[in-house]
Amino acid sequence: MKIRSKEEDAIIPYLPEKGWLGEYLRFTHNLETCPRFRFTCACCAMGAAINNKVWIQRGDEGLLPKLMPNPWVVLLAPPYRGHKTSCINMAVNCLIQAHEDVRILADKLTPEAIVHALSAPVSAKEVIRIGPRDATGLIQAPEMSVFFGRQQYNVGMVSLITDLYDYREEWKSETIGRGKEILRNNCISILAGSTPKWLQDMLPQDAFTGGFMRRFLLVELPVTWYRRVASPRKPKESSWKKLIENFKQFKTLKGQMGWTSQGKAYHDQCYEEFIPTGDDQYDAYKEAQSEQMLKLAMLLDINEGRMEVTRPSLERAKNILDSIMPETAARIQSLATHPRMVICQEIKALLTAHEEMLESDILARLYRSLGQGERQFYEALSVLKKANVIEPVHTKGGGWSYKLKGEVK
């Protein structure tokens, strides 16, 4: 069984080296966390700091809602791997210390409590303000299953959060206990972590076409990343205090971002060239990626002091999304798979991680989840072979090993 080399992440060539984002990446470089986790957490924190103070207009005003640079991020990794919680907490701690007026929602809350919290004062100095506050803030959910799970108190949470994704000048909700609640100029960010199994078990199969998950940037731990650092060290020229001070620069930002002519032309080209594949779940996610690309490009340009969206930033954003898409595409396939065929996805995941495996090794990894015994395993192998997904390789000892069709990159 071949084990891949460690510390490979396809996102690395496209990460920014300048500005606050570059500084954050350098400061956290020697941690065990993969670069894509550290970068997307920093982007989410930056978007929450800017919130609704900066926006861009797509098309003529009034036809589409304002778009803010606030990506919703979900880190995905198996239990006890990837350091999801640590990565999320570090970015949020940086946000809180630099931008003390940002509203953080991090507890088990009902949908009604979320609405109330988003309209409540953030600080003591805001108490005297009359009327609804801007509904801005960051939902911090290191364990997504706790915040968005199927518990009784969370009934309606998914539909509420989905509804609050798009900017509105005014949003109204009526509850029995509190009466009418009004949210103004909503712009929330979400930084969450989850295990792939939780998404598989808890989300409905139409989670993407239904609109909830397609609003998130799914960032999965690459199988090629594995790092152990017992005593991490920060770069000599870096300090946490300096990082916080430099993060405060985004407090003064305000206004509408423009477009460079080349940036606008490139964005329109990328948006209009999308062609559905016929896979509803995949297409729903990919269709929303033009919006994710624009949000990331806005952050990249703001990071370098520009209030215009440029073509180089859009190209970098597209490369970033393309670099994490292989894991995401496989995860979407897995989430949209019928429970009976989940074993097929598990076999694919093993072959992606190890390139080629003996039949006996695959069975040794999966036998605990075979509810129907040996027959279920060989049925899955047969399905994958007939679907031209895997191919058998005859071993010298007379047995069989399997690998994915084509060379695994």
Image: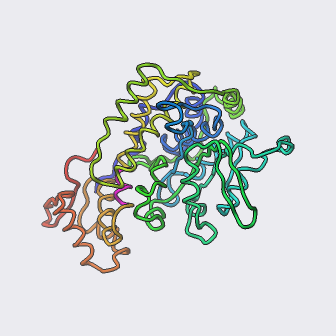
Picture quadrant where residue 287 is located: top left
Task: Give the x, y percent position of residue 389.
Answer: 21, 57
Residue in front for this viewpoint, 43 or 195: 43
Task: Give the x, y percent position of residue 237.
Answer: 64, 26
Q: Is residue 36 left or right of residue 47?
A: left
State the residue lying farthest toward the bottom.
Answer: 372
Residue located 15% across and 61% down the image: 395
Residue in front for this viewpoint, 397 or 240: 240
Q: Is residue 350 left or right of residue 216?
A: left
Check the picture and name the quadrant holding the N terminus: bottom left
How was this image coloured? Answer: rainbow
Taken as a whole, is the magenta stretch helix, strand or loop?
helix
State whether residue 3 is above or below residue 200. above
Check the picture and name the quadrant holding the C terminus: top left
State whether residue 373 is above or below residue 403. below
Task: Give the x, y percent position of residue 170.
Answer: 65, 45
Q: Is residue 119 left or right of residue 142?
A: right
Residue located 31% across and 80% down the image: 372
Q: Is residue 53 left or right of residue 300?
A: right
Residue located 52% across and 47% down the image: 73
Residue 371 among magenta residues: no
Residue 332 among magenta residues: yes
Picture quadrant where residue 320 is located: top left
Task: Give the x, y percent position of residue 275.
Answer: 29, 42
Please give the count of numbered marks on the rendered protein: 0
Residue in front for this viewpoint, 372 or 157: 157
State the residue lying farthest toward the top.
Answer: 261
Range of the magenta residues? 329-334
State whether residue 151 is above or below residue 325. below
